[in-house]
Image (cartoon, coloured by chain):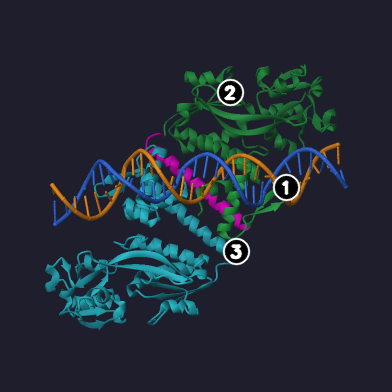
Chain colours: A cyan, B green, C orange, D blue
Amino acid sequence: MLELRHLRTLAALHETGSVSRAAKRVHLTQSAVSHQITALQSHYGVPIIQRRGQSIELTDVGKHLVVLAEKVLDEIQATERDLAKISQQASGSLRIVLECHTCFDWLMPLMDEFRQHWPDVELDLVSGFHSDPVKLLEEGGADVVIGSDHKWQRGIVHHPLFRFEILAVLAPEHPLRKKRILHAADFADETLITYPVPEDRIDLILNVLKPAGIHPQRRTAELTVAILQLVASRRGVAALPSWGIKNYVDHDYVIARRIGANGLWSDLYASALKETASRPYLRDFLATARNTCFATLDGIIPLE
Amino acid sequence: MLELRHLRTLAALHETGSVSRAAKRVHLTQSAVSHQITALQSHYGVPIIQRRGQSIELTDVGKHLVVLAEKVLDEIQATERDLAKISQQASGSLRIVLECHTCFDWLMPLMDEFRQHWPDVELDLVSGFHSDPVKLLEEGGADVVIGSDHKWQRGIVHHPLFRFEILAVLAPEHPLRKKRILHAADFADETLITYPVPEDRIDLILNVLKPAGIHPQRRTAELTVAILQLVASRRGVAALPSWGIKNYVDHDYVIARRIGANGLWSDLYASALKETASRPYLRDFLATARNTCFATLDGIIPLE
DNA sequence: CATGACTATGAATATCATTCATATATTTTT
DNA sequence: AAAAATATATGAATGATATTCATAGTCATG
């Protein structure tokens, strides 16, 4: 018999277009998802997915079920919000610390949506730079930290959001355009354009350049668009999330190159105090964050 | 985590107003439903039902979940109809044989609804009296029989619908009004008004009067209203399903009395050939039949 | 053609829902 | 008032079945 678990994986299947990625998305093994699919298919007596070489495609029946899944899962989320309101767990504060500057791109629309759903929650973005954001949580100055730190700490829970690739961004006519993959040495004579944060918070420097003993010039800008403008006008190169630059790359405003043979990847977590993490509105925030990210951001991979 | 199974029992809980009846409705034990409730309550951290002495009442939270459940379950049913249409399993015939005359009361609106959902299914009511309706199934003259027969037969499946009580119906000023419970002997000098079917198809005669050697006079009428009119005008007494006479009893047009200490009960099944029973539209028909019956008919009890 | 990435499948395992047995609570009956 | 009947709750045992594990098959790519 049909269960919500099936609808959840169906939705993930649609989002990710792959059994194994969908499995990660719903925190199962690839095998489990495969079994679920076969179970569904034998239940309805018709195929639901079709192998398309590498990845998979949903059949007509599959698509109908996905439509159902999205509708139903949304409705469930909505009534769970209602339940929180009824039981008066719908107020409190949600002060967000953002370690990843580019993330503001997807966070802003998300915050707008959140504000509508939880009008009684005090929503804020904690501005400024914070050397130890987790300390901020403990001191009560913030409620969630969105960043890549996830070392175990007493009383703190880290909710995995997603993994994304950081690409080098160049002007279209930049000499390095001829290389498909860039390495540390390629950055030696470049000016690196970054957000105005310390070196140890920039993955490219921390994980690639510094280990190779390369220390390029730096120049900073506050906004992603500003960085891209500088790159496009050949003032230097940058390293940004693939989804943050997709539009600009698609329009040939800049070009993007992989960094290192396997690429430079970063993981994003939402961290909170154990107690605050159980609040309905925070759970809802995280759920919708994941939903919208997987729906709107290209090339991201589920974590865990 | 919430699953459809929870929503299904929640809906049953709402319909039946009792844990044990809901359990029967979803084919589980009372214990299982009780466990499900406690699981849900601990998941949401709030009570969902409240004991009201004998039966139970849903809390505010519970009611919200029921609303969700009904919406979601309807949507699932609707898309499952769509799936059948896509995979071209939405045509065929549904010819219904009705052994229980009163059932026409709930069957007619159901047929109207069904016709909208399955426009390509040839829907018919097989009229006339049939001594061996199951034979009709095997001969291909009908697709479903709605009646109380459910003895095992090769190739036939009996889907339980519900159990209902058959009450004696009297004119309000009938002398027998003084008795709370009627027994076989009470019918000795009465005229029994029935549908025009053989004696062995009338539960009162078969299970109560004949064993007691009582053979009252009989008079027949085709329609339930006609029978009730005859009863009201003191031409005799009748024995009809409790839900079939509820409106008339509530308006004091007639009165109803239990037959025998434990009452006279009858079970209703929908029987079909094994192969036809697997058709999507037939499964849908049975599901909606149960749904509408439990929603609209008073005093019926889930079977099995 | 070898290698890596993805999916399918049967068997083993683990989880968790359900049942069983029993206790508690409430209403009805005598 | 006590007893019987009816309804629900609960812990332990059971059973079902979803998930994982181990492995083989498929498809792309350099």
A199 relative to B17, above or below: below
Marks 1 & 3 on one chain:
no
Snapshot quadrant of residue D24: top left
- Residue A87, numbered label: 3
Question: In the image, what residue type sits under mark 2?
Answer: Lys
* Quarter of the image where one finds residue B126: top right
Depth check: A191 or A245 in front? A191
Q: Secondary structure at mark 1?
A: loop
- Picture layout, residue A152 above or below residue B248: below
Residue A37 in the image, given as x and y percentages of width and height:
37, 45
**Residue, x 50% and y 59% (percent of image)?**
A78
Q: In terms of depth relative to the viewer, which is nearer, B133 or C23?
A: C23
The picture places residue B136, in percent across and down from the top left corner, at 52, 19
Chain ID at mark 2: B
Q: Is residue B202 in the magenta section?
A: no
Q: Secondary structure at mark 2?
A: loop
Amino acid type, label 3:
Ser
Q: Which residue is mark 1?
A: B54
Residue A298 found in image quarter:
bottom left
**Residue sitting at x 57%, y 67%:** A89
C-alpha distance separating marks 1 and 3? 26 Å
